[in-house]
Image (spheres, rainbow, N blue to C red):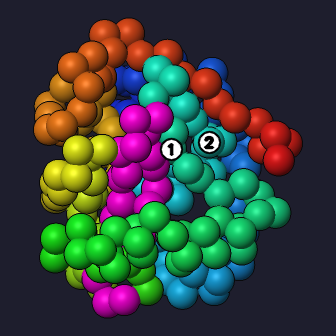
Amino acid sequence: MLRIEELEAVLPAMVPWRAAAGRGVDWAVLDAALGTALPSDFRALAEAYPVLVVDDFLTVSVPRPGTEALWASEARDDEILQDLFEMGDTGDYVPFPQPGGLISWASSSSGDSFYWRTSPADPDAWPVVVRGDNGDWSEFPVGAVAFLAGVYGRTIDVGGMPGDFPGHDPQVVGLSDDAH
């Protein structure tokens, strides 16, 4: 499992947004509301960083302290994914909480969605699944932090993304926990 420091090395513009003392996400509330634990790399990312927007394109959605149940509810009731599933536009993927269902953790301003496939049972083994705005589905056998590090370190290529993704000097904005 990739450490956050390895992501920071390839995406240094995120470092100023790091919460030195941790953010205090109540994982017990989130896990209970969601019905599953989340991968440990994502938990570490969510403890260290607020919601991050990279190059005004990719938004990494982490739970804000005090809104864990809301984050879990939005993850369980992903209307866009449910609509795609009902239209038969999810390939072999299903929405969570179905077994092996998808949970969203990031999105792009172009309509791309980034998920975990919740199978196998160990959240730390969940692969990343990407649905491009062109309707193509891709699966990567890594966690969210390793995926981001691979994309911004240019070792993972995500088909169907804009030609300028990722940017050569990605800028990062952290959204304040007080923003909502």
Q: Residue at x 71, y 69 (%)?
A: 70
Q: Amino acid at mark 1?
A: Val
In this view, which residue lies farthest toward the front?
A: 87
Q: Quadrant of the N terminus?
A: bottom left
Sooner in the amino-acid sequence: mark 1 or mark 2: 2
Question: What is the distance, in whole Å, between disc 1 and disc 2 at their CAs?
Answer: 6 Å
Q: How far from the left and from the top, in percent, is residue 103?
A: 42, 69
Q: Residue at x 46, y 64 (%)?
A: 80
Horizontal relation, residue 148 to residue 17: left or right: left
Q: Which labelled disc corresponds to residue 60? A: 1
Q: How far from the left and from the top, in percent, is residue 120?
A: 24, 81
Tell me the magenta residue range.
98-116
Residue 36 position (above or below residue 137): below
Horizontal relation, residue 149 to residue 110: left or right: left
Q: Which quadrant would residue 123 be assigned to in this image?
A: bottom left
Residue 38 position (above or below residue 86): above
Q: Is residue 67 covered in magenta?
A: no
Q: Residue at x 41, y 72 (%)?
A: 83
State the residue position of label 2: 51
**Disc 1 and disc 2 in contact, CB within 8 angstroms:** yes
- Can see residue 152? yes
Helix, strand or loop status at disc 1: strand
Q: Nearer the viewer, residue 112 or 99?
A: 112
Q: How far from the left and from the top, in percent, is residue 38?
A: 47, 70
Residue 168 position (above or below residue 55): above
- Can see residue 123? no
Horizontal relation, residue 63 to residue 57: left or right: right
Q: How far from the left and from the top, in percent, is residue 64?
A: 72, 54
Q: Nearer the viewer, residue 173 or 43?
A: 173
Helix, strand or loop status at disc 2: strand
